[in-house]
Amino acid sequence: MYIYTVAAMPKQKAKFVGDPSIKYQIKRVNTCISDKGKGRNEIIRTNLEYDEAMAIIENFNSMEGKSQIIRDKEAKRKKALETLPPVNSTRLSYRINTSQRSIDMSQNKQQDESDRETKREG
């Protein structure tokens, strides 16, 4: 999951929150990576007005919330599938073998008939 923040561009200081005289950048922190891991912080947008930056962050946060809901649903679905009893594989394989055997038998009948016709002609 990501956390998005607004910060002033380097070498610029805001006199108050939302100061329009400076430009801002959006930073993203990956919370899934440990504190010691490299690549935890990223600058994803630069040279923005404060209002633009806040609108982008609100959009990112709403999308992040939606994707988290989807991930949670998928995890629940996988967990439910794991708790289902196993399929009786011997019955399934017997059905497959039986149907394969009937296919093989019909192919053998056709081959026998074509052999008989060949012998009659010759």
Image (spheres, rainbow, N blue to C red):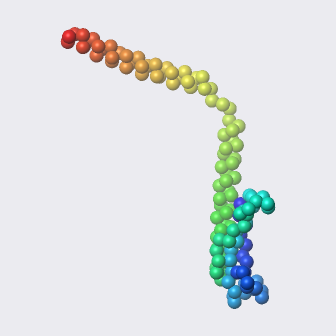
Q: Quadrant of residue 51?
A: bottom right
Left or right of 36: which side holds 24? left
Up-down relation of residue 43 to residue 109 (above or below)? below
Count all numbered tags in the image, as a single digit: 0
Q: Which quadrant holds the N terminus?
A: bottom right
Up-down relation of residue 112 to residue 46 (above or below)? above
Q: Which quadrant holds the C terminus?
A: top left
Q: Quadrant of residue 38?
A: bottom right
| Image x and y of residue 27, in percent | 70, 71
Up-down relation of residue 92 to residue 39 (above or below)? above
Q: Quadrant of residue 47?
A: bottom right
| Image x and y of residue 75, in percent | 69, 48
Q: Residue at x 69, y 41 (%)?
A: 80
Q: Residue at x 63, y 29 (%)?
A: 87
User: Is residue 36 or residue 113 the one in the foreground?
Assistant: 36
| Image x and y of residue 49, in percent | 65, 83
Res. 58 visible in picture? no
Up-down relation of residue 2 to residue 107 (above or below)? below
Which residue is farthest left?
A: 121
| Image x and y of residue 7, in percent | 73, 77
Res. 71 visible in picture? yes
